[in-house]
Image (spheres, grey):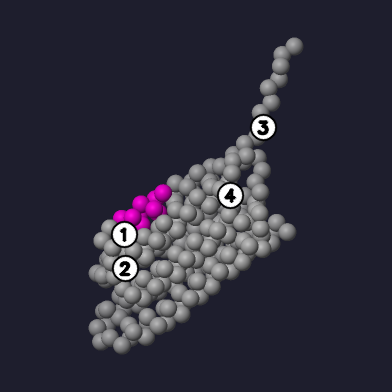
Amino acid sequence: MKRRLWFLPESPDVVKQLCEQATVSVECLEALVSWAQGAADAADHLRDAERRAGERKRELWRALRAAFSTPIDPEDLYALSFRLDLVLSAAHNLVRESEVLGLEAADEPSAQMAALARDGMARLRDSFAAMTSDRDRATELADDARHTARDVEHAYRGAMRRVLDQDDLRRIWAESERYNRFVELADRVAQVSDRVWYAVVKEG
């Protein structure tokens, strides 16, 4: 009589993979802070971190296809990963457009807003890690991330008052565009926060 071999279905640690994507995403926004502070090679570091985060995203998506079961709805894990990627796309576009517009990187309001966005991303990373063990903590951290996004809007208003005191219309337009990109970046951080709440509420 032949022995039948049974294989357990795959159970990759998809939450850990999401946290790894978020960790690299924090690195990317840390590079954005350095860029806004005038570090010469920060833009290259940002692009490298964005590329590595993209690799983590694709690894997670492949794992979601193979996983037999997941501790969080696969749709929510996919959405969180996708929205993280949108945050980094916003950071990349911000730097690229600043370069095209001929704006110097070092800028105090930009550094302030970049630091707030980075802090929000760090809280999201910690929120992901808590989603399966302490849902209250996960949503608390998600709320903290959303609050940093609101703080970016406050910093934006202060920056725009300074911009409008200038006489150079081209510079007013260029700096306004850059600061608007920071608001967009913060809004995308907030959207990740909202999805954390959705995922946790669904799990009950």
State if disc 2 and disc 1 touch (CB < 8 Å): yes
For marks 4 and 1, give the CA distance.
29 Å
Earlier sequence position, callout 4 versus callout 3: 3
**Which structural element holds mark 2?**
loop
Query: On the rendered structure, is 131 left or right of 81?
Result: right
x%, y% of residue 18? Answer: 54, 51
Q: Which residue lies under the disc numbered 3?
A: 8
Earlier sequence position, callout 4 versus callout 2: 4
Q: Which residues are magenta?
A: 42-52
Q: Which residue lies under the disc numbered 1?
A: 42
Residue lying at the far top of the rendered structure: 1
Q: Residue at x 24, y 83 (%)?
A: 168
- Frontmost of labels 2 and 3 is 2
Give the residue type at disc 1.
Ala
In the picture, residue 96 is in which quadrant?
bottom left
Query: On the rendered structure, is 80 left or right of 166?
Result: right
- Does any portion of residue 97 appear in the rendered image? no
Q: Residue at x 34, y 84 (%)?
A: 162
x%, y% of residue 66? Answer: 59, 39
Q: Residues within 10 Å of mark 2 (few under 14, many from 20)?
A: many
- Frontmost of labels 1 and 3 is 1
Q: Residue at x 71, y 16 (%)?
A: 3
x%, y% of residue 35? Answer: 32, 64
- Does any portion of residue 77 appear in the rendered image? yes
Give the residue type at disc 4.
Val
Q: Residues within 10 Å of mark 4 (few under 14, many from 20)?
A: some
- Which disc, if any, is residue 65? none
- Frontmost of labels 4 and 2 is 2
